[in-house]
Image (cartoon, coloured by chain):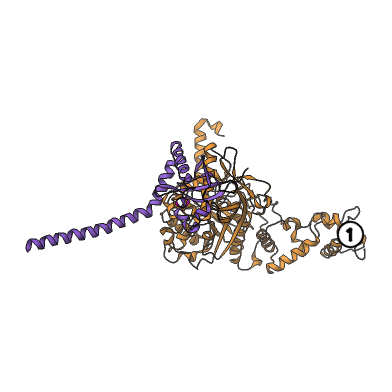
Amino acid sequence: VTARVGGWRAWVALGLLVAMLGLGARTLIVHADGARAEVTKCPGVDLAPRLASDRGTPSTQTLDARGRYVPIVVVHGWTSRSTHNRGRSGAFSHLIDLSDTVGRKPAAQRSLIGQLQKIPGAAVYTFDYHDLSAQWVTHERLGPALGKALDCLYEKSGEKVIVVAHSMGGLIARWAVTHDADGGGRRSEHVSTVVTFATPQTGSLLAKLADGVIDSSPQLVVLRIILADCGRRTARKFETGTICDFLPDFMQAFRTPSGDALQAGSPQLKALDPFPKDVTYLDALAGETTLKVPEYVGWFETPLTRDVNIGDIVVMQDSAIDHSSAHTVAHCAYQLNAVRAQTDQIGLTLGQVSQQDVAQPLWKVFGPCFHSNLMRTERLTNEATAIIAEDISKRRPVATQQTPLTATADPDDKLPTCSEYGDMEPGQKDVVLRRMQEDHNDTLPRFVVKGSVLAYCALNPGRHIDGIYAPGSHAPDGGSGPLPLCSAWRDLDDVASDAALLRLARQRGDAKPDIHALRLVVGVYCKFKPDHRIDDSPGG
Amino acid sequence: VNARRVVVLVLDIVLLAAVVGFFVWQSSRSDAGSSGASTESEQARVEGSTAAGKRKQAREVRRALLKLARNPDALVADASRSKVGKRARRAVPRGSKVTPVQRTWSPDGTGGGTMTVKIKAPGKRQVAYAAVMVREAGGWKVLATIPVANP
């Protein structure tokens, strides 16, 4: 059309029209049953978009069964960003791809923000202060600005806000929550849960080191050795692919007003009030790296220590979990060797403790417990998700009003099979069980469901875990062919397994088979007789 | 009599001024001492960030480490004093041969750094250490060490 109307003027007009439409457009939250509600807009925060590569995340956020949503504000750490986009450079945007279990590699299906967006009734907002990272939390565009955003989100949504913060973001949240709301009243009453990743509640030892403080604590001695090794590496090569690409930047950044304040025991930190009790839950997540030194750190022949805990390298564990209601820690252990090369240069190698035969270059494996990577770590992100899902689910009037997310659910986002479930981390299992219970309006205590799944899965390893609810046969009919051996039947998927049972029932002349009973009876039989055919079961 | 009173009064004033001055001087000295570590570390950090500064520091650190054999106690950093106690001589036994390796000096970016130093104590095998050095009271001191294994 533009071509026919003629030339660049038409394109400009079309562009203006699109821009005007864009300005007037409203962002909507879509309810599972199709109901829509306008997204709250508040100064200082942006609704996080849904990224296509976050698997299983609904196309838009969903309202909960009451037709409401709970705002979740993510606040990044020092010098980082919260912005959530395809570049995934934001602190909470990287795919969850790290595990502190040696040898385990998570499937990296979605980011923490994507994971939170999966919770029915969650609306994730980002608070970004990257350009002001050098400022302390009292700066008007940090603590006070977050406070205003929390007030606004609470007022417009009518729901207590949840805050997820990394590092200094947790101190900004602490400032905001411990000050009164702009309209009067305690702001802490507008916030239900605060989840912090590695927030230096009592300061950072690294900041102390950056200020030139000389301390003989083993942590700081080892950090000095690592920094010296980094100096040697980066002198030879700009990008080393190790922690040395990050650590000196941290040290540099510590030489700012906020860096001074982040020193352990600084007057600025002491001036911050602790989180008030109105905040019902303060969940602290932290990384703890233990360096096992083969020989003693000491003073020549005088030995001092062998195991050195250096927290997440930037923040020590005791600082990160100070005053928390609960905490979860990702643990990593490495063996640190100081070695002498042929040139007599000192070099450091790092091997994972359980794989000591594989010597690694320093911090090549700096993954799951490093300060900036905690939001990529499976254990910690599962914990954060579970806590937040629980907070939101408690606000629903009754579970029976929960609407299944059929309208927006991702077809790939099935409940796991028993085998997949068995491989999950405990926190991840809880998230899955919670979702399954919600889908089935099941209000039984979690431990009962957990026990049922355990028993069911022992008998049916190839089936999906919601088989405990006996939803009927997954197969339309039994089809034809021989009955399988128990060992083969146990590994079949839902449809093939049920088809075999229907064939078995047909051969036995059972016109109305109880498929659930058959699964259990054959399951028990096959557990003990894997080399028999399933029709050899008692009475077969 | 009046002249004598004036002299006594002047002497009193001078004495008072001297006492006050002495306390002010002492006070300023202790203030400087408390921030001195930080200032000195900062100077060493800046110096170590240039190639020439790094070479100069390497020479200084080597010279300092050579004193280990003669007087190890003088090389104990203040921050390590309580941990090392009076065991400095035991840590570097009398008669030890000390060989610092100057080219291994590597600043840590916070005002200190590490240097390899080999110690051969009488009757014992030679051990190589990475010595963590810090700058204190105008000289280089050993904060801690970690044995350096052969690759």
Chain painted in purple in the figure: B
Q: Quadrant of the C terminus of chain A?
A: bottom right
The magenta stretch spans residue B70: yes
The image position of residue A251, as x and y in percent, is 48, 47
The image position of residue A513, as x and y in percent, is 86, 64
Chain painted in orange in the figure: A
Between A298 and A15, the one lying in front of the other is A298
Reply above or below: A251 against A423: above
Residue for point 64% across, 65% down: A401
Amino acid type, callout 1: Ile
The image position of residue B147, as x and y in percent, is 57, 48
Between A149 and A2, the one lying in front of the other is A149
Residue for point 65% across, 67% down: A399
Residue for point 85% across, 56% down: A489
The magenta stretch spans residue A14: no
Residue range in magenta is: B68-74
**From the viewer's perspective, is B143 left or right of A30?**
left
Q: Which residue is mark 1?
A: A534
